[in-house]
Amino acid sequence: MNNAKIVGIGHHVPERIVTNDELSTMMDTNNEWIIERTGIEQRRFIDPSKDTLANMAAKASKIAAERANIKISDIDFIIFATITPDYFFPGSGVLVQRELGLEGIGALDIRNACSGFIYALSIGEQYIKTGTYKNILVIGGEIQSTALDLTTRGRNTAVIFGDGVGAAILQPSTDDKGILSTHLHADGRFAEELYVKDPGSSRPNEERQPEQILDTSTYKVHMNGSAVFKHAIVRFSEVINEALDKNNLSKEDINLLIPHQANLRISQFLQKKLELPDEKIYNNIMRYGNTTAGSIPIAMSEAWQEGKVKENDLVCLAAFGSGFTWASALIKW
């Protein structure tokens, strides 16, 4: 079977830049407090009058297709990883399909939060290996800004998240390049440590679809930050080493590690534990915040643009997030 190879990647973020100083006018916080705890300096928020998750995904997808030297019409399957679809249902996969004019092809939606893009990549890899599809569009993206509690009550999560989308084109590899392996894990015992409770289905009718919502707290992100941090630093390391062991490689073989952009402190801890020099880890959380399923493809697209991902490089992707879920992918570029 052929490997699945990323042949093009692109990203799109909203125009509006929201700085820490701007957030400090909405809540009791400041630039130094946010940077110290997260490493974030700014993030992007959508303009609800013109931006949708689907149209941002379409823009990222067109860039990826152009870089892959294929026509949009060559795409034969879509996998969209997001926890913030434009509608409760259907998922945004069919909406980006409509935006791209790809009537009739399959569209699959993945809801694995911060690990979503790697889960989607792994699924696409299997379709490529079995010869089911030839040009798979894999997307990861979110609109978090419109659900944030932009008050002091919600600042612990409000300062973290941002909006954006990344996309990649997967094709069969004709050589030894491509995805060497993917590794997926989950532990539902910790589901409520990072989640949005509503609108959930396991409610009485009057709670699931109330005529009037007076308390929207269960519609906001709940995060036990210390629990997430403690689990993340363990699982990140485990899943990276799992990928290296599977391929008989060592951390010294990695040319670039692209971790999910959850918190700069987590990335720095991971870098120190793996003894990686600065040039071997890519972070852009300072510019975009945590874009959940969008963070890895956005970072990968930027790293490629900046010449930090080159032919024959060994690139490792790793993520940890809600679920808890965690995952890694090892790629020979």
Image: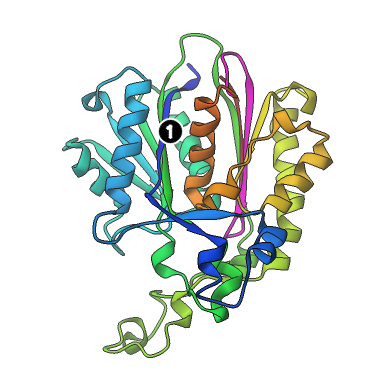
Look at mark 1 in the image and give the residue it sits on: 124
Q: Mark 1: which secondary structure?
A: helix
258 shown above or below 90: above
* Residue 147, x across and y down, in percent: 42, 69
Whether residue 134 is visible: no
90 shown above or below 243: below
Q: Residues within 10 Å of mark 1 (few under 14, many from 20)?
A: many
**Badge count:** 1
* Residue 70, x across and y down, in percent: 29, 19
Whether residue 250 is visible: yes
> In the rendered view, does 266 fall on the left or right side of 44?
right
Where is residue 248, by image quadrant?
top right
Q: Residue at x 46, y 9 (%)?
A: 174
> In the rendered view, does 10 fall on the left or right side of 206?
right
149 shown above or below 299: below
Q: Residue at x 60, y 49 (%)?
A: 286
Where is residue 46, by image quadrant?
bottom left
Q: Residue at x 27, y 46 (%)?
A: 55
Q: Nearer the viewer, residue 65 or 320?
A: 65
Residue at the outermost top position: 175
Q: Is residue 270 magenta?
A: no
Q: Which residues are magenta?
A: 309-326
Q: Identify which amino acid the numbered label 1 is placed on.
A: Gly
